[in-house]
Image: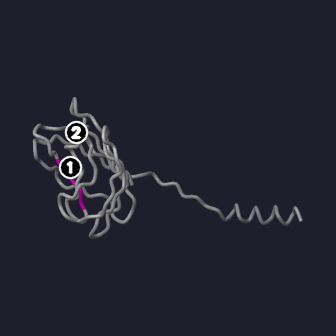
Amino acid sequence: MATVVAIITTIVVANAAQTFTTPNSAFVSYSLAAGANSAPITPATNRSVLVMGCCTSPSFLGVGQVSLLSTNALINWVGLESAPSAAITQGVGSAAGTHIVFMDSLHKVSIQVASGTTIRVNNGDTVTRTGNVTLIW
């Protein structure tokens, strides 16, 4: 009996396979005047994408992140807004300007939907803001 179990276990283990792939990433820096939007950013389509953004402007530091899925017509996301009022953010949208996540301490700099397949950074404050956005898929 022990021999049969060992043979079956060996067969199952021999057939198990795990594939490791090197993740892809994109890094976008921004320096946006008051009220400005970045150029559209195109996340990978039909796969989960981790989107992390931060504001590096002194006195407005912050970070927000979402897991995002971009299809051919809609963007879906769930994640966490920047502190100090951190909260879950979630949604689905294709309309330009739809809020995805805040990246600064005053909740003025955000990642927004730019189209059904792209996102953008928006500076809703009255002063220039700087930072970056990283996408990993």
Q: Position of residue 100 (x, y in %)?
A: 27, 54
Furthest toward the top, the residue is 58
Residue at label 2?
Answer: 106
Give the number of callouts. 2
Q: CA distance from mark 1 to mark 2?
A: 15 Å
Q: Quadrant of residue 133?
A: top left
User: Nearest the camera: 14 or 51?
Assistant: 51
The verdict on residue 38 being magenta is: no
* Magenta residue span: 118-122
Above-or-below relation of 75 to 102? below
In the image, farthest residue toward the right: 1
Between residue 99 and residue 28, name the one nearer to us.
99
Give the image location of residue 107, x and y in percent: 23, 43
Q: Residue at x 15, y 46 (%)?
A: 124
Residue that label 1 marks: 121
Q: Nearer the viewer, mark 1 or mark 2?
A: 2
- The secondary structure type at the circle numbered 2 is loop
Considering the image in quadrants, where does the N terminus appear? Answer: bottom right
